[in-house]
Each structure stands twice: as structure tokens, then as C-alpha cells.
Image (tube, rainbow, N blue to C red):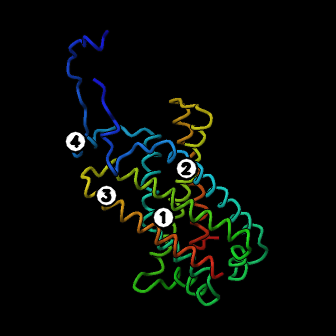
Amino acid sequence: MSELNPAPRAKRPEFRNINALDDLPGYRWPLAAIVSGMHRASGLFMFLLMPFIIWMFDTSVSSEFSFARFTSAFTNGIGFVPGILVKLVALGLIWAYLHHFFAGMRHIRMDIFHTVTKEAGKSTAQLTLVLSLGLTVVLGAKLFGLY
Amino acid sequence: MSVNYGSKRIVVGAHYGLRDWLAQRVTGLLMAIFTAIVLAQVLLTKGPMGYDKWAGIFSTQWMKTLTFCVIVALLYHAWIGMREIFMDYVKPLSVRLSLQVFAIVWLVGCAGWAVQVLWRL
């Protein structure tokens, strides 16, 4: 019956993020939002650097000769790119991978156990950051020859 | 007044949700397992890691097959993620479609290169 006699409805308000420059700086970024945003950013970063990742795979496994080129890239650089920059990009990739890895595990945990609460959202976001940043420091120290 | 959502579908829109949602998780798990397997082999290596030991990890037939599956999984996983980013931030259809074509060419090219490296080992 309601379909035959639809009650007139007030137009519902619409909220759109059209003024990015005015609105976005005012947004609150809780920890879970930071982890989520970084998940996306790290994925994009690895997508853009995928040719470099495959270059590392190619040179490191193809031959003894290319392996030497691979290792020297981190000290002598590649072409006009200095070695320190290669190391920094590699460190960025390590960080991006670790963050993406743990943030992805966080998502799978939410999907499997359906335990989506505000508290768990915050504590698992903290855990993600601690694990990814901690391991990045450990592996980064190795990369820069600190141990 | 029923709305036919079918007629509102556009070529680069969403609506293929569940399959891709599930695929992204399955491919992600596969890559996580692969990471653990490679890491275990690196950590179990005795002595300094040289070319022979590193390349040896990827040269066995089962590792080649697994790595091949992971390359395909990565291709699909990254495609779903990039499409998500384009759908969220890029509204003009022509720009979005162009970026999606670029992402596909980029990813398929990278996957082809990785498979080539793997298969001449």
C-alpha cells in the first residue's frame, strides 16, 4: 500500500567532501585511521616501485656477475643514483612491506573473528605500528651496517 | 518506483565486490606464507649469504612453482588495490579508465619480467 501512496519525503541532506583544502585539515585522525591511510599509501608506493623490486630480484638471482652488480648498487649506486639513496629507497620498501603486511593481518583478523570494536581498533592499530616500525629499525640497522 | 541498478553500472565502477574482496585476502595470505617460507630459508642458511645460496632458494622446482603462483597473486592483489584507489579519488571517467589501463599494463609488464627471471634460473 505504501508503494501506491508514497508519503512525500523531505530531501535528505547530502554531505560531500568537496572542499578538500578546507575540510581535510580539520579531520581527526585516530590511530586506526593513520594505520588505514598508511596501508593504502604503502601499497601505492610498492606498486610504483615494482620495477625496482623486480630489478633487485633479477640482478640478485640471475648470475654471479649480476649479483655483484646488485650488491654494489647499495654502495656505489646505480647510474647517477648514489648508493645512499638506493639504501634509503630499500629502507622505504622494507617499511612499506612490513606496514602493509601487519595492517593486512589486522584486516584478516577482523574479517575472521568479526570483532570490530573501538578499543580493539585502537589496540591492534598500536600493535601494527609497534611491530612494523620495530622490525623496520632492526632490518634498517642491518641494511646500514650497524651490526 | 523501482530503481534498476543494473542499468546504472558503468564499465569502471564497483559492483564486482565480493569476489575481489575475497581474492584480495586469499592472495594476501598466500604472499604472507611465501614471505615466511623465504625468510625461514634465509635464516636457516649457514654462513654468509652469497649468490649460490640466495639463488639456490629459488631454483628448486617447488619454489619456482610457488614463486610463480605468488607473482600471479601479487598481480591480482595490486590490481584490486589500485582500482580501489582510482575509484575513491579519481572521478572523471576518462582519467580513471586511462589510469586503470596504465595500472594493468604496468602490472602485467612487471609480472612478465618476474616470470622471465624465474624461468631462466
As drawn, the label of residue B97 is 3
Please, what secondary structure does the residue beneath circle 2 have? helix
Decide which of tag 1 and tag 4 comes sooner along the chain.
Answer: 4
Closer to us: mark 2 or mark 4? Answer: 2
Quadrant in which the C terminus of chain A is drawn: bottom right
On the image, the x and y values in percent for residue B80 come to: 46, 53
The amino acid at mark 2 is Ala
As drawn, the label of residue A18 is 4
Looking at the rendered structure, whether the residues under marks 1 and 4 are on a common chain is answered as: yes
- Residue at (58, 31) in percent of width and height: A115
Residue position for label 2:
B23
Picture quadrant where residue A111 is located: top right
What is the CA distance from the residue labelled 2 to the residue labelled 1?
27 Å
The amino acid at mark 3 is Leu
Please, what secondary structure does the residue beneath circle 4 have? loop
What is the CA distance from the residue labelled 1 to the residue labelled 4?
32 Å
